[in-house]
Amino acid sequence: MGCRSGSGARPASYRTELLELFAPDHSPWVEIGQRIGVDALGVVLSRLGGEKVHVPTEDNFWACLERAVRDEEIRQRFRGWNMKELAAEYGVDTRHVRRILFGRRDR
């Protein structure tokens, strides 16, 4: 939703009041601003403003973080000989453990 105007730098209190004028369903950004606050919204907009951004589903976001933690645990626990044991413990095959440890060299 593009609204361009010369609003310039306004105090946070003004921006908070502005957000409160709108229902959360006016724009996802209004709802996000109302939930996280004006300062945090400013950081998000500064970082992502004008970019095309893929927003994952909530389930996918958490699953990706869980996989990253699992993969790091596998890397930390690998001792050079326990690939099969790690695969069984984490419910993946040894080829997947190898990919986690060494990249996609097994293709």
Image (spheres, rainbow, N blue to C red):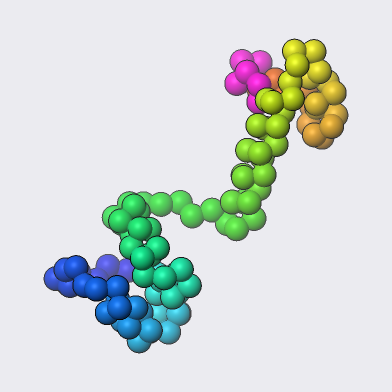
Report the residue at 45% width, 79% height from top.
Answer: 25
- Looking at this view, is 27 or 81 the one in front? 81
Q: Quadrant of the C terminus?
A: top right
Rendered position, 27 above or below 53: below
Whether residue 102 sits left or right of residue 23 in the image: it is: right
Range covered by the magenta-colored residues = 100-107
The verdict on residue 101 being magenta is: yes
Image location (x, y in percent) of residue 82: 81, 18
Identify which residue is drawn at 35% across, 86% down.
Answer: 21
Residue 29: percent from left, percent from top: 40, 69
Q: Nearer the viewer, residue 102 or 42?
A: 42
Task: State which quadrant residue 105 falls in.
Answer: top right
Q: Is residue 88 above or below residue 47?
A: above
Q: Residue at x 59, y 51 (%)?
A: 61
| 4 lies left or right of 27 | left
**86 lies left or right of 38:** right
Residue 95 seen in the figure: no
Screen quadrant of the N terminus = bottom left
